[in-house]
Amino acid sequence: VAFVEDPTVFLNAEEHGTAAVFDGATDVVGIFGNEYGESAIAEVPISGSVPTFYTWAAWVPSPEGKALSVNSVGYAIVRSEPDGTGFTTLILEAT
Amino acid sequence: VADHVRKQLRSAVTAAVTGLATTGARVHESRIYPINSALPCLLVYASDESAEGVMLDESADQRTIEVRIEGLAQAAEGTVDEILDQIAKEVEIALAAPVVIGAFQTNLSYTGATMSMRDDLAKPVGSVALSFEAVLFTSAPDVIIGA
């Protein structure tokens, strides 16, 4: 179901959101995650972090391959995972 | 008391691949815990073993032991495979020379490699698993009588 409310109510940098800069120029807000993760690629997994940014999809058009700066840390957007409501989770790669 | 021959071989191989240009001292023997940021690195395992009696000496066994070395790396997309190939090159060169186990030297036969890459962490990760075989003659699980 498409989301009809104002997304800025739910993504507010002065409350539970994080400000970021999309594609070097556009200020956006989202929920930044950087939790522990493991990649089961070998006999033992490689551990690390999994950076993601949950935001309003319309604010970040055609995001794959573009840059996102969060808390002054640069990331490349690997892919976008829309949830069908208008929000999307950006999967980030540290640069 | 000497270690089991698998342990002796694994340790000898670990010594032979420690200090390589790309992986340095980051070599782990039979590691089971996750690897964190200390990459690139090598994991050394002596996994499978087959054995058969020696025809002219019933007290002896001919053991074929598989040694698996996994190289792990984390880097930007497009460079992970290059690092893994460099790791493979360095390991293969290091193990082209005979490995010293006690009073014996044994040659390891290279039997193949498998490479894989994933993108489920902040930077892409990759592994190259190199397989080798060694043949050792033993009179007991911890006594090598020939290689």
Image (tube, helix red, strand yellow):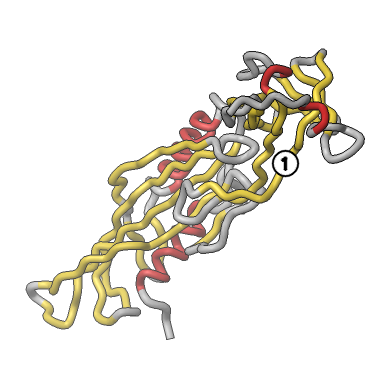
Residue B56: which quarter of the image?
bottom left
Q: Is residue B136 left or right of residue B18?
A: left
Q: Chain of mark 1?
A: A
- The answer to whether residue B63 of the structure is visible from this angle is yes
Q: Residue furthest right?
A: A14
Measured along the vertical axis of the image, is residue B81 above or below residue B72? above
- The amino acid type of the residue labelled 1 equals Gly
Q: Is residue A13 left or right of residue A92?
A: right
Which residue lies at the image location 66% right of the left edge and 50% below the top edge? A36
Instruction: Say which of A46 and A35 sits in front.
Output: A35
Measured along the vertical axis of the image, is residue A92 above or below residue A35? above
Q: Position of residue A13 (x, y in %)?
A: 87, 32
Measured along the vertical axis of the image, is residue B31 above or below residue B143? above
Instruction: Say which of A51 and B67 sits in front.
Output: A51
Q: Is residue A10 left or right of residue B119?
A: right
Which residue lies at the image location 68% right of the left edge and 38% below the top edge? A51
Q: Position of residue A91 (x, y in %)?
A: 63, 32
Instruction: Say which of A19 and B130 sits in front.
Output: A19
Measured along the vertical axis of the image, is residue A24 above or below residue A74? above
Which residue lies at the image location 71% right of the left edge and 33% below the top edge? A53
Q: Residue furthest bottom?
A: B1
According to the picture, the residue beneath numbered tag 1 turns out to be A33
Give the class, few, some or many, for how many residues have Cα within 10 Å of label 1's Cα (few <14, many ≥20): some
- The answer to whether residue A81 of the structure is visible from this angle is no
Task: Point out the image quarter for the C terminus of chain B.
Answer: bottom left
Q: Position of residue A38 (x, y in %)?
A: 57, 50
Which residue lies at the image location 51% right of the left edge and 59% below the top edge? B15
Element assignment for label 1: strand
